[in-house]
Image (cartoon, rainbow, N blue to C red):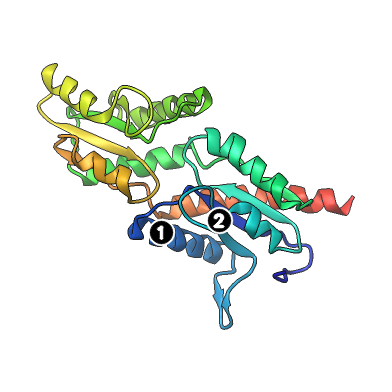
C-alpha cells in the first residue's frame, strides 16, 4: 500500500489511454501540473503517492489497480471531455472491482466554458478568422448522454467565436469529419478549420489532419485553465469525502 497523508484523499486522474507517446507524455505533464496547482508536485523521493494516473483502455494501470494500492480515501477525476460509456460504466465498475470503500468520483472535465475558451484560442492560432467555417471535431460515442455533452460543448465554442460551428465525429457516430469538411466546401465555404475537441495527441488527432481542412487546431492539452478545472473538481469532491468520513 502507498501511504497517504492522514485525512487527505489521493487524486487519481483517469484517462482513456493511447498508444501515442506524445499523448502519454501529455497526460503525465497534466498530472504534474495538477499536482503543482494543488501544492504537491514531485518531492525528492519520487512521485507523490497522493497523485496517481490510471487508464481505462490501451494502457495500465487501471483505476482498480491504483485504488487497491491506496490505503486512504481517493478522488477519481475522469479526464474525459464528455460523459459516455467510460464515465458511466467503466469507472464505476473499476471502483467496485477495487473493493475500496472511500472513493468519490467527480463529473467529467467537459463540457465546460473553460474548455471552449481554450478551443477558441487553439483554432485562432491555427489561422481561423471570422468568416471561416468551423468544424467541431469530437471523438464520438454511441452514448446519447455523451452526444448531448458534445452538443453543449459545441454551443459553448460557437458562443466564444461568435460564429456557427458544425459538429463532426472522428471515430464513432455521424457525420464524420471529412464529410462535414467536404460539405462545407460544397456549400461555398472558402476556408474550413477544424476545432479539436480532443484532450491529447494520438491517432484521432492525426486523422483530423487528413480530413482536408485548411487548418487543424491543436488538442486542448495542458493549459492552466484545464489544470485549474481538474484541481477544482478534486477540491470539491475531496472536501465532501472528508466530511462524510468524519461523520
- In the orientation shown, which residue stands out farthest toward the right? 247
Could you say where residue 47 lies in the image, as x and y percent from the top left? 56, 73
Residue at image position (28%, 27%) is: 176
Could you say where residue 186 lies in the image, as x and y percent from the top left? 12, 18
Residue 227 left/right relative to 217: right
Instruction: Let me know if residue 188 appears in the view.
Output: no
Q: Mark 2 points at which residue?
A: 54
Task: Locate residue 62: give its quadrant.
Answer: bottom right
Could you say where residue 215 lies in the image, as x and y percent from the top left? 17, 40
Q: Is residue 117 above or below residue 165?
A: below
Q: In this view, does 188 lie above or below 87?
A: above
Residue at image position (37%, 25%) is: 173
* Cα–Cα gap, marks 1 and 2: 11 Å
Residue at image position (37%, 47%) is: 220
Asked which secondary structure carries label 1, the reply is helix
- In the orientation shown, which residue stands out farthest toward the top? 187
Identify the mark at residue 43; answer none if there is no mark: none
Question: Is tag 1's residue or tag 2's residue first in the polypeptide sequence?
Answer: 1
Residue at image position (34%, 28%) is: 158
Q: In this view, does 146 lie above or below 11?
A: above
Identify the mark at residue 24; answer none if there is no mark: 1
For disc 2, the neighbor class at 10 Å (few under 14, some 14 to 19, many from 20) is many
Asked which secondary structure carries label 2, the reply is strand
- In the orientation shown, which residue stands out farthest toward the bottom? 44
Could you say where residue 82 lies in the image, as x and y percent from the top left? 49, 35
The quarter in which the N terminus is drawn is: bottom right
Amino acid at each position: 500500500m502507498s501511504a497517504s497523508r492522514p485525512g487527505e484523499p489521493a487524486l487519481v486522474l483517469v484517462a482513456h489511454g493511447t498508444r501515442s507517446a506524445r499523448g502519454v507524455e501529455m497526460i503525465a505533464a497534466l498530472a504534474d501540473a495538477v499536482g503543482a496547482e494543488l501544492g504537491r508536485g514531485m518531492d525528492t523521493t519520487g512521485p507523490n503517492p497522493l497523485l496517481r494516473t490510471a487508464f481505462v483502455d490501451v494502457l495500465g494501470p487501471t483505476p482498480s489497480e491504483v485504488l487497491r494500492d491506496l490505503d486512504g480515501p481517493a478522488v477519481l477525476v475522469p479526464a474525459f471531455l464528455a460523459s459516455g460509456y467510460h464515465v458511466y460504466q467503466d469507472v464505476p465498475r473499476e471502483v467496485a472491482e477495487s473493493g475500496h470503500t472511500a472513493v468519490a468520483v467527480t463529473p467529467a472535465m467537459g463540457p465546460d466554458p473553460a474548455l471552449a475558451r481554450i478551443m477558441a484560442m487553439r483554432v485562432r492560432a491555427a489561422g481561423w478568422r471570422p468568416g471561416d467555417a468551423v468544424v467541431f471535431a469530437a471523438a464520438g460515442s454511441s452514448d446519447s448522454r455523451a452526444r448531448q455533452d458534445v452538443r453543449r460543448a459545441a454551443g459553448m465554442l460557437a458562443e466564444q467565436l461568435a460564429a456557427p460551428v458544425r459538429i463532426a465525429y472522428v471515430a464513432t457516430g455521424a457525420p464524420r469529419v471529412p464529410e462535414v469538411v467536404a460539405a462545407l466546401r460544397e456549400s461555398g465555404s472558402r476556408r474550413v478549420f477544424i476545432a479539436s475537441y480532443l484532450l491529447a495527441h494520438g491517432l484521432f488527432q492525426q486523422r483530423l489532419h487528413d480530413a482536408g481542412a485548411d487548418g487543424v487546431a491543436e488538442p486542448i492539452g495542458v493549459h492552466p485553465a484545464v489544470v485549474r478545472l481538474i484541481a477544482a473538481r478534486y477540491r470539491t469532491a475531496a472536501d465532501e469525502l472528508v466530511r462524510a468520513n468524519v461523520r
